[in-house]
Amino acid sequence: MKKMIIMSAAPGCGKSTWAHKYQNSHPNTYIISSDEIRFELTGQYQDFSKQTLVWEIFEKRILEFSKRNEDLTIILDAVIDLNSLRVKYFNLGKDYDRRILVVLKKPLEDILKYNHQREKEKWVPEDIVKILYNKFEEPSKEVLDLFDEYYYINYYFN
């Protein structure tokens, strides 16, 4: 069975932490991370000069994994914060047997605190965190109904 897990959260909510914990306990799990693709292309996590290419590669990797003839799980680790983006990636994953949405929620003050505990090269400017946090759209019932499963995670995990 091929599964696609779409992470949905503001920066600093713990998407990457959650994805790596899941990967460590589930064999054949692969993470497609927009941050890591950006780093591959530019050598920096916060260099947004090649964003168009980042998202082209992100989508290409989703499709490449969908063509494999094996049981696997992919996790989309990106700020997928709008219903339109959740639908876009849901549809892009049409060749996966199960599509799962994981929504991470934390209070803004906790996100800002955690942001400065990250490695310095992964810090997100505070004004950007606030903009993305305020822009985050709660998944609509119509979007949630698309998915085979969905989860809200509203707590810290270590």
Image (cartoon, helix red, strand yellow):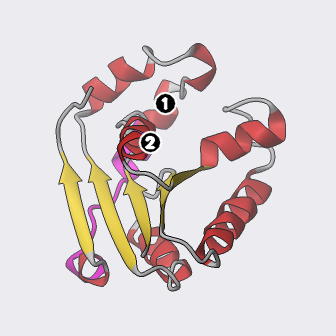
**Which residues are the magenta region?**
130-143
Tell me where residue 145 appears, x and y as whole percent: 24, 82
Is 150 located above or below residue 77 in the figure? below
Q: Give the structural element (helix, strand or loop) at label 2.
A: helix
Residue 37 x %, y %: 70, 46
Residue 133 covered by magenta stretch: yes
Tell me the quarter of the picture where residue 144 sits: bottom left
**Which amino acid is tagged 1?**
Asp
Checking the image for residue 25, the label placed there is none
* Dot 1 and dot 2 residues touching (CB under 8 Å): yes
Which SS does the magenta portion mostly show?
A: helix
Question: Foreground residue, 21 or 59?
Answer: 21
- Callout 2, which amino acid? Ile
Q: In this view, does 22 lie above or below 29?
A: above
Residue drawn at x 24%, y 71% is 149
Quadrant in which the C terminus appears: top left
What secondary structure is marked by label 1?
Answer: helix
Q: Is residue 95 magenta?
A: no
Q: Which residue is drawn at 31% across and 83% down?
A: 146
User: Rounded to the nearest whole Å, what is the CA distance between mark 1 and mark 2?
Assistant: 6 Å
Q: Is residue 121 above or below residue 26?
A: above
Q: Residues within 10 Å of mark 1 (few under 14, many from 20)?
A: few
**Residue 118 relative to residue 144: left or right:** right
**Disc number for residue 127:** 1
Q: Name the residue under label 2.
A: 131
